[in-house]
Amino acid sequence: MNGFWQQLLRIDAYSLYACGAYVLTAGLAAAELGLLLARRRMAAGEAGGQESKAAGHKLERAR
Amino acid sequence: MRSWRAARFPKSGPLARSCFSFVERHVAALCAGAALSCLIGVLTTFAGEPATASGLSRIALIHAPAAALSLALYGAVTLLLCFCAQVQPPGRATALWRIARAVLPTGTILGLVAVATQFLFDRPATGAWWVWDRELASETVLLVLYFGLIGLHAAIDDRRRLQRAAAAAALAGIPAVLGAYALGGPAALAAPATAAFSASSILVTLGLSLYALTAVVLRVRCLMLEQQREAAFGFAACRSSA
């Protein structure tokens, strides 16, 4: 276990670059998924709004 | 507010519909699975390498799956675009067309990661940030092709012309990538052979694949909802002008 932590916390050029690469990948992936979830929520809300508006017009015409 | 689950999947079979629904219902679980898979892959690599290892495998662990996936996604996009342009009714926004469009940004992100990790990979050995070896050349060409296809989608409004142009551009990109690989300089530094097909590399590949699948499904849903919204706008405009 001691060897594992020594390996994990080793500081050399490759380890630092690798750490940067992991952070870059995780950040890009998280940003993309977060933006997509927000976009889906917004698009669903607007589509719903359009539908309810159309339903409102229909109701008005029926009256 | 209307639920996103209520949107329908036009022109898609029951199998595709159930797969999409499954992925959409389990977005959080898939993201957690992707993160966990990558984390286990990274930790097993760290624990498994000898104390005298140079640490090359740490970068190769993320570089190799990202490069392979971005190339595989590009191949899939090319097939889908060619199929849409030649076999399906021209100018129609079919499910395959939406999937091809949805794959592009995810492939671009994976290509960016592949290029970034490639020059991080070469930097400690060569001392330069950018070495035109064959891998970096082909990955850069692939990234430029992804950007080009995204720009093409943004630039052309006529869907029939867009489908033909995108299919031709994607198809022309394959010899460009292969040519860049063939004509580029020799690899500045060889990746450790054990890093390419180790269990931890497979785990990271699985994690990145799960991420790509989730992102593509979410983006297809967004495209569908936005198309429905545009159709509703058009319908409302027609009704108000009549």
Image (spheres, rainbow, N blue to C red):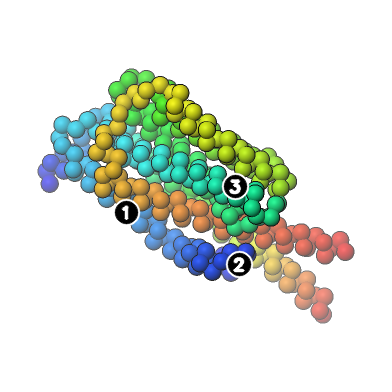
The numbered mark at residue A52 is: none
Marks 1/2: CA–CA distance: 32 Å
Q: Quadrant of residue B71?
A: top left
Q: Which label sits in the foreground, 3 or 2?
A: 3
Q: Is disc 3 in the same subunit as disc 2?
A: yes
Q: Residue at x 40, y 29 (%)?
A: B135
Residue at coordinates 78% horizontally, 71% vertically from top-left?
A57
| Residue drawn 33% across the image and 19% down it | B127
Q: Secondary structure at mark 3?
A: helix
* Structural crowding at the residue carrying mark 3, measured as other residues with C-alpha within 10 Å and reported as few (<14), some (14–19) or many (≥20): many
Numbered label attached to residue B36:
1
Q: Secondary structure at mark 2?
A: loop
Residue denoted by label 3: B81
Image marks 3 and 2: residues in contact by CB distance under 8 Å: no
Q: Quadrant of residue B1?
A: bottom right
Disc 1 is attached to a residue of which chain?
B
Apparent side of residue B224 relative to residue B158 in the rendered image (left or right): left
Asked whether, in this view, residue A55 is left or right of residue B66, the answer is right
Disc 2 designates what residue? B8
Answer yes or no: do the residues labelled 1 and 2 have beta carbons within 8 Å? no
In the image, residue B228 sits, relative to residue B130, either above or below, namely below
Q: Earlier in the sequence, mark 1 or mark 2?
A: 2
Please tell me which residue lies in front, B135 or B148. Answer: B135
Q: CA distance from mark 1 to mark 3?
A: 33 Å
State the image coordinates of residue A13 (x, y, percent, origin top left): 27, 28
User: Disc 3 and disc 2: Cα gap in Å?
Assistant: 23 Å
Identify the image quadrant of residue A7. top left
